[in-house]
Amino acid sequence: MKLDLDSREGWPDNLRILLDAYPRNVWRDHANLGEMSRFWLHIHAQFRSLGRELSEMGEAFREGRMEATDYRALYPRRLSQFLGGLEGHHSIEDYQFFPLFTAAEPRLARGFEVLENDHESIHAAMVAAYQSANALVATLDRDRDAMMKAAEKHDGDGERLLGMLTHHLDDEEDLVIPLILDRGEGPLGIS
């Protein structure tokens, strides 16, 4: 089974060992879902929400429901918040949480390696989205055709990023939350 982000469809059986014991429908009310886990899930929900907001802004701009001046004032700032937050979040996971989780459950080590590789792929998509956003903003004072062409390019880059991110967040939660429910935040060293 391929485990790269573009072709992965969930985790293989050897990485589902805890997910099968702790499916998503038991997470919310589980006693071991502590403050750190809830905060982490909340951060993931914020990334999903901000991603949708950015996508909706782009759609409103392309469809003429948002003026170029408003788009220029709002979109770059929100995109920077999104990308900066995501970069920081991934750094914390890669350097703090994933090593703790791998040490606690070596059978999931390959999954955490895959998630770190996802972060690299997502970073490349972030760079592409950032660059095409800058190119779009640079066209806002030009003719409509150049602006729409740049908007289409950025929308494609943004949708690719959001698709990758959504897939990654789902898979990450499916690996991490069952481990936390199984062991508890305190014993894992994340409380």
Image (cartoon, rainbow, N blue to C red):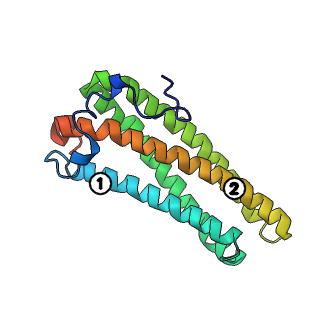
> Residue 73 has which mark?
none
Q: Nearer the viewer, residue 82 or 28?
A: 28
- Residue at image position (55%, 42%) is 122
Residue 58 lies in quadrant = bottom right
The crowd level at tag 1 (other Cα within 10 Å; few <14, some 14-19, many 20+) is few
The relative height of residue 70 versus residue 153 in the rendered view (above or below) is below
Q: Is 51 on the left or on the right of 127, as rendered? A: left
As helix, strand or loop, the secondary structure at mark 2 comes to helix
Q: Is 44 on the left or on the right of 65, as rendered? A: left
Residue 104 lies in quadrant = top left
Picture coordinates of residue 130, whole percent (x, y):
65, 53
Q: Are marks 2 and 1 in contact (CB under 8 Å)?
A: no
Structural distance between the alpha carbons of marks 2 and 1: 31 Å
- Residue at image position (48%, 50%) is 86
Question: Considering the image in quadrants, where does the C terminus appear?
Answer: top left
Question: For mark 2, what is the residue?
Answer: 154
The amino acid beneath tag 1 is: Phe
Picture coordinates of residue 121, whole percent (x, y):
56, 37
- Residue at image position (31%, 27%) is 102
The relative height of residue 109 versus residue 71 in the rendered view (above or below) is above
Question: For mark 1, what is the residue?
Answer: 39
Q: Is 95 on the left or on the right of 143, as rendered? A: left
The crowd level at tag 2 (other Cα within 10 Å; few <14, some 14-19, many 20+) is many
The amino acid beneath tag 2 is: His
Q: How many marks?
A: 2
Picture coordinates of residue 117, whole percent (x, y):
50, 31
Q: Earlier in the sequence, mark 2 or mark 1?
A: 1
Picture coordinates of residue 79, whole percent (x, y):
57, 60
